[in-house]
Amino acid sequence: MQHSETDNNIKELPYTHCLNCGTELMGGYCHNCGQEVEDKTPTITGFVMEYLNNAFIWDPQFFKTFWRLISRPGHLTNEFLAGKFISQEHPLKLNMFLLFVFVTLFLFFTSTEKMTAPVDDVIGDELVLPGVQLGVLADDKEYVLKMEESARDTISLHAPLFLAENHPTIISNIKTIEDTQGEGLDRWIASVPRILIEDEIIVKGDTEYYHFNTETDIGNTEIGIVSSIWSEMVRITSQYFPMLLLLTAPFLSMSLGLVQRRSRLPRINHFIFSLHYTAFLESLMITIFVLHLLFAPSLRVLEWIMIIGSCTYLTIAFRKVYNIKSWIMALVKSLLTSVTYYIILLAIFVGIFISACFITIANHI
């Protein structure tokens, strides 16, 4: 009877012997090498779907796992550590898929120009450039001596008022005409060394007011170096961004191990927990990034969503996974974990900054 059923199953298959190893087939999978029995020429859709399913996650199990990840902090970790593997997607596979989605969105909708724009706006801002210029002059001992020996002129200025507060030895006898409270250029009268006018550091505009010459070379070198360093940091981060995100899981695992060192749990426990928490962070970043693209809300609001969401989730998950009865203790340990984790990440970005400095200096030599 069994032999008859086997014969019927073989007849329903497109071929009788495995195309990979040549073994006679007894079902939908080769019992020798494990290859699935499929048509020799699959459709394009089937080919792509098979890749997505094998390389990442593309089946109903993912959505069930993802919902439990979001709605029940710490539940997936406890189930996995209890040996329930088949009821959820593998933590690393889940993490990799969410990382793939976030990196794809990030690289597709974020260009190098967009990432450097905030710094470009700041270093080119008419509120910042005069401060940089005066800062350079104040550090030049020879020019400071020239300013001290120079005669002074009382002029009307259209420039940031904070310059007078930061450099009282250069700019004195201030009389405010208009104070914009840091939102724009101010109008005021002051006594300044005449050499600043002679060297065209301060020039007279179309009106009766003087302003700082933004075309002067003073400070431009420093501004250019700052811009180059930031651009290099953006380039390094963009190039290695997926790897940096992938490294967050082991670094978080290290943080958990430090905070929970008295529990003497196996390292794999911390690592599985870090994978699930990192997957949640990636899903939160995806949500925030999409909200920013669609509705362009304030970055400060998004930062608070990220901070409050991640801390709340970590506290609940921490209490459940490590069986901590006190909510206060769970909150304290989650905060300690976050601080340790961010210190490690800060060390990474300090390394990126140092690398960017070396590369920038080498390019300018």
Image (tube, rainbow, N blue to C red):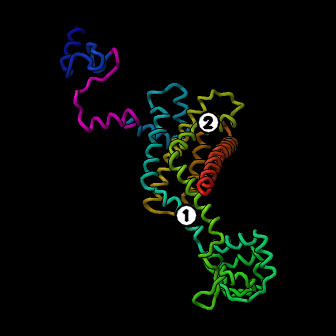
Gap between marks 2 and 1 measured at Cα:
33 Å
Name the residue nearer the viewer: 148 or 83: 148
Per the rendered image, the range of residues in magenta is 31-59
Residue found 76% across the figure and 78% down from its top: 170
Q: Mark 2 points at which residue?
A: 253
User: In the picture provided, is 249 more to the left or to the right than 137?
Assistant: left
From this view, report whether residue 87 is shown above or below residue 243. above
Q: Which of marks 2 and 1 is in front?
A: 1
Q: Name the residue under label 1.
A: 118
Task: Check disc 1 and report its element: helix, strand or loop.
Answer: helix
Residue found 40% across the figure and 37% down from its top: 57
Q: Which amino acid does label 1 sit on?
A: Pro
From this view, report whether residue 19 is shown above or below residue 71. above
Query: Could you tell me residue 5's position as x and y percent?
Result: 22, 13
Residue found 59% across the figure and 90% down from its top: 207
Mark 1 or mark 2, which is nearer the start of the sequence?
1
User: In the picture provided, is 139 more to the left or to the right than 123?
Assistant: right
Task: Check disc 2 and report its element: helix, strand or loop.
Answer: helix
Query: Could you tell me residue 35's position as x and y percent?
Result: 32, 22
Name the residue nearer the viewer: 77 or 32: 32
| The magenta stretch spans residue 223 | no
Query: Could you tell me residue 268's position as x and y percent?
Result: 59, 29
Q: Which amino acid does label 2 sit on?
A: Ser
